[in-house]
Amino acid sequence: MIDIHCHILPGIDDGAQTITDSLAMAQAAAEQGIHTIIATPHHRNEKYHNVKNDIIRYTDDLNGRLKEEDIPVTILSGQETRINGDMIDDIENGELASLNDTKYLFVEFASNHVPRYAKQMLFDIQVAGYMPVIVHPERNSAIIQHPSILHELVQKGALTQVTAASLAGKFGSKIQKFSHQLVEANLTHFLASDAHNTKTRGFVMDEAFQELSGEHGNEMTYLFMENAQLLINGQNVNKDEPQLIKKKKFLGLF
């Protein structure tokens, strides 16, 4: 398996705090069958500022330690950037890191809203030659309340990535149900761990793919796995026409 979203680099955000933590995470990943991980430290959120050149250096250092410890996992460089008005400038000045130096770029929203300028920024990112991937939309309260927000963004070309723990029910039944709805409506394209450690925010990728297969069939599982490979190769990923998530009937009425 390939994990395209992970906070495994040590001491630079709220993920692994030490190299020992990073090695333990890599070992746990390997035990789940994960052989490649994109390291995606936070950037431009309230606390953390991790720029492209630093991330590449930290990634190289960790790969060296993994080789020394004979842990069969390869780390690729990436970044989880909180959406902001300077993203195009930051792309041009080399501050933003795409995923494995491809056209794919993670974009994070705050957990409780989607800014009004999001549609324009995601469009501008595409004009600049990149493909925005919205991370963990299933945990955004505004999107949960109004899934049409996400539908419009995906219809305009954005991709999305659901968290493995969400699909596996680790964030509660409401988020799990909404994650399944996103899959059913073709509103998400990747499944990734967003792992931060081995205890409270682990990988859960094996459990999530079992859930995905059980609810949506093996074909959907293969699609998500293939999309991760296509992403790190910089190729176009599989996607179907997004659908609106319909509100459930109550007493036979909408």
Image (cartoon, helix red, strand yellow):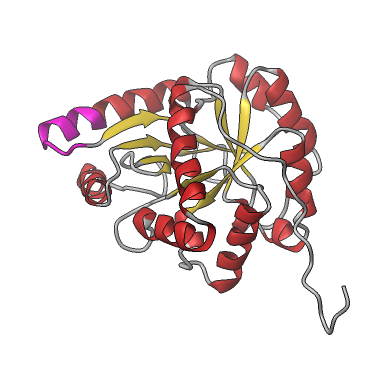
Rendered image quadrant of residue 152 = top right
- Residue 212 appears left or right of 35: right
Q: Which residue corresponds to the image point at 49% horizontal and 36% vertical from the top-left?
A: 227
Q: Is residue 81 above or below residue 232?
A: below
* Residue 125 % position (x, y): 68, 25
- Residue 152 appears left or right of 52: right
Q: Is residue 55 visible?
A: yes
Q: Quadrant of the N terminus?
A: top left
* Residue 31 % position (x, y): 22, 51
Nearest to the observer: residue 156 or residue 199? 156
Query: How many callouts does the rendering have?
Result: 0
Nearest to the observer: residue 188 or residue 70? 188
Rendered image quadrant of residue 34 = top left
- Residue 53 appears left or right of 22: right
Rendered image quadrant of residue 134 = top right
Looking at the magenta stretch, what is its main secondary structure? helix
Q: Which residue corresponds to the image point at 44% horizontal and 23% vertical from the top-left?
A: 233
Task: Identify the residue at the far bottom of this view.
Answer: 251
- Residue 95 appears left or right of 125: left
Q: Is residue 204 above or below residue 5?
A: below
- Residue 69 included in the magenta stretch of the image: yes
Magenta segment range? 62-72
* Residue 131 % position (x, y): 62, 27
- Residue 76 included in the magenta stretch of the image: no
Q: Is residue 202 visible?
A: no
Q: Which residue corresponds to the image point at 40% horizontal and 43% vertical from the top-left?
A: 6
